[in-house]
Amino acid sequence: MRSGILSLMVEKGLEGDCYVEMLDYTIDLFESQGLGTDYYGYHNINHELEVTYVSLLATKQNKVQFTDGDLKYLYISALFHDFDPQKSVDKPHEESVLKFISRDRKLQELINMAGVDLEIIKVLILRTTYPWSGDLKKNAEEQIKQCFQNSDLTKNDQQYQEHIMEMGEYLSVVDRISGYALGDFTKAMEMAKMNAHALAWRPSLIIRSAVAYFEELLNAEPEMSKAILKTLPKEMRKNFFDTVLSFMKIRQEEITIQADYSYENLKLVPTIEGMSIRKDPKFIKTLYDIFLQLPTPLQFEKENFEDTVKNPKIIINTLRLNNKNGEIVGFSKGGPLEKYKLREEIRDENYGLGNTIFLEPLALKMGYWGLKGGSEMRHMFIMQAHSMKYKYLTSFALREVIKARIDKEQAEFVTLFDPERWDYYRIII
């Protein structure tokens, strides 16, 4: 992506050394703060670079007329729009972004070299506030008004202020389109899972939220969206609309499943699986395909998946449709804590004592979350662990879910993780 941005910079006349330094400084800082390509969150360095790339690529659209001077502001604002490397949650807070770019000496030096007004950069970043409605919009507009008053270029020029707001709308729409135009539906689904994981959403919200996101974009800002998409290469337009249609199709399937469950046309049956079927290649493949739908950080023992399924020390339950021989739509899996390599930050006092079983994150097909099947599998797993004389169970779960289990199950936090808030906890069996 860096090379693509550099090519567009040359094409758009952004050839000063300061612009290249800005790009490399942004990449280095995101990487050094653990928000680089390995960070499993939507707002990582990939997102920052994708927005920068598409914002330059689509400038020839017919909705906003950019001058050469405008391109400097657009490039810098796109590059820095989520520049919040010390964030405590994945979604950047625009005020934190502005505070950071206003105080960082290196950025101040580069912005001065570019000869641009920081107050205008702030306005463009504030306009990327999402959603652009309610209190978020009101607060952003108040800050924007102050930025316009602080700038000698804008405080007495209403027409220029309106132009900058149009530029901000352009950047905001590019911000929401870019990642989905730069890859196929597999990439889009991974982005959706990253967003859900980093924002601590329940899995049942992933598809529903994705559909709402695209509908809001295309309905609330149709002219800007249409202008930008029309300018993008055909393959990128196809990626975007294929993604929208795919999410809508999956959402329709989800609603059908939920309706069938509500009308009692289908039942979810938690099932203890014996060792004979666990050696069946088809069974293993079925579980593995469901396993791959989990967010990457929740895919434990991926390289040894087949061996763990065949291991008699590992507990495996499935969730089947209608009866114990029905289609598998989910599973629970886990074993002795010592067989797992967990995150380095975790210091479990029971590790090595052989008294703790680790429950891997539950895996269900899209559409079957929120129907209580996962909860039933988990309780079945706990009963089996109790029969095997384990004293404790540990696992990962959303922070709010663990809090709800403190009174019910004497759950306790062992290690908390931010920004994702997907924490490691323990219960007494």
Image (cartoon, helix red, strand yellow):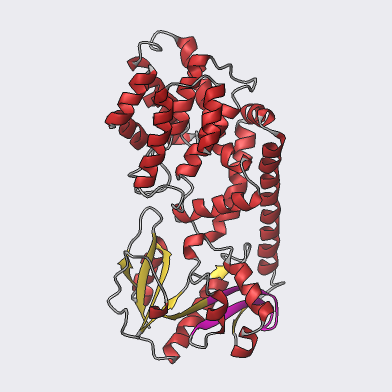
Height in image: 429 above or below 301?
below
Quarter of the image with the C terminus is: bottom left
Q: How many marks?
A: 0
Q: Which x, y percent locates residue 313?
A: 48, 87
* Residue occupying the point 60% across, 33% down: 220
Q: Nearer the viewer, residue 210 or 342?
A: 342
Residue located farthest toward the top when viewing the structure as drawn? 156
Q: Is residue 324 magenta?
A: yes
Determine if residue 329 is in view. no
- Magenta residue span: 314-332
Height in image: 72 above or below 83?
above
Q: Which x, y percent locates residue 302?
A: 52, 69
* Residue occupying the point 46% across, 54% down: 40
Q: Is residue 77 magenta?
A: no
Q: Which x, y percent locates residue 215?
A: 63, 41
Q: Nearer the viewer, residue 385 or 45?
A: 45
